[in-house]
Image (cartoon, rainbow, N blue to C red):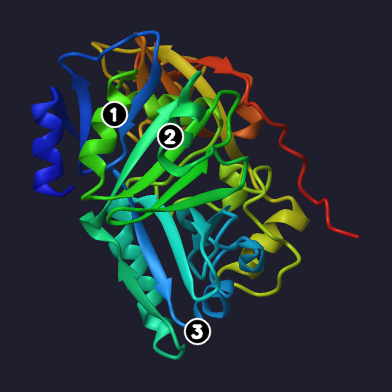
Amino acid sequence: MHPEWQAFLEARGARFDEHDGEPCVAAFDDPGDPAGFELTDLSCIGQLCIEGPDAAKFFQGYATADVTEVSADRAVASALCTREGRTIATFRLWGPPDALTLRLHRALIVPVRDLLSRYIVFSKAELREAGDSVVGLGLVGEGAAEAVASVVGRPPEPGEVVRREGEHGERVALRNRGDIDRFELWLPRADAPAIWDALAARAHRVPFSRWLAHRIRAGYVELSPRTAGEYVPQALNLQALGQIAFDKGCYLGQEVVARMQYLGKVKKRLFRYSAEATEGACPALGSPVHAGDPEGEVVGEVVAAATDGGRCEMLAVVRIDHAEDPLFVGRSPLRAEALPYGVPPLREKAS
């Protein structure tokens, strides 16, 4: 986060805390109108750009989704795996074939850049970190679409990217999955203060944890350094979310991912839970999930957690054969919550 942007938010009553090694807004002294749309800062999320004539051709060999479906006006959700098929990053991807943008956890930008830099030297493309030159804002709920339209002209449809040239550069809007309107605005840093003030005048300013809770309820996990490199994509339900193209050809880790899909060997997968927030906090990422009682067998791990309204919203990767057992994290019992999508069985090979 750029020091000037953090100072600006602090002057607007923001208080910061660390989230996975990154400073994020923990609260606002004056949150504003509780009936307004929700507005939050997304500085825990960042961007990595792949630019050059071979950008799309190069990245087609690494992304799990089909990069040919990406354009300046269309974003897709995707992932990046190790050679062993372990997921090291989940992200949104958009842009023309010669200028792709990956939106991902800010702390994963350097590891992803370092991995791709080993191979990109053979292509007419280069990696560039957007760094603090762009600022992300999250808008949620009734009125959010109109607020986004005030910045970029109109709200995007699902999967669409709306772009508009601003005073200091391009403004970009995305719509996220979920049952409620949830948008991202990506702005030149020089434009962000005035836009924040205009939006905040009619918004309910919320901490980053509220944004995370919405994302968890949508059943989507965005990997962080604590959860990267641990799971095959199917354990994170990425095949159910359309983040894997099984007919696109080879990419890094593709052989392992395809074998998992068609042989049905995944023993764990992502489930959604909630629990009482212990002393106002959620368990750390990677915390073990126990079956039967708090001292029972370890059958999974927490991969996303956020406090919201006195409760903790969680996603955990749990052994499928224990998914219906009583489960605990620490001394707290977990309450099973429904995912907003179905998870098809494996072994469904395309005809």
Which residue is identified by label 3? 53
Residue 129 rendering spot, x and y as whole percentages: 29, 65
Whole-percent x and y of residue 112?
A: 37, 65
Q: Residue furthest right?
A: 351
**Tag 3: residue type?**
Pro
Residue carrying label 1: 198
Q: Amino acid type of disc 1?
A: Ala
Q: Quadrant of residue 341?
A: top right
What residue is shown at x 56% (from left), y 23% (from top)?
180
Please state which of residues 219 and 196 is positioned toward the viewer in this rendering: 196
Residue designated by label 2: 150
Where disc 1 sits, the SS reads helix
Left or right of 314 on screen, residue 265: right
| Residue drawn at point x = 50 percent, y = 76 percent | 98
Tell me the CA gap for discs 2 and 1: 10 Å
| Residue 187's disc number | none
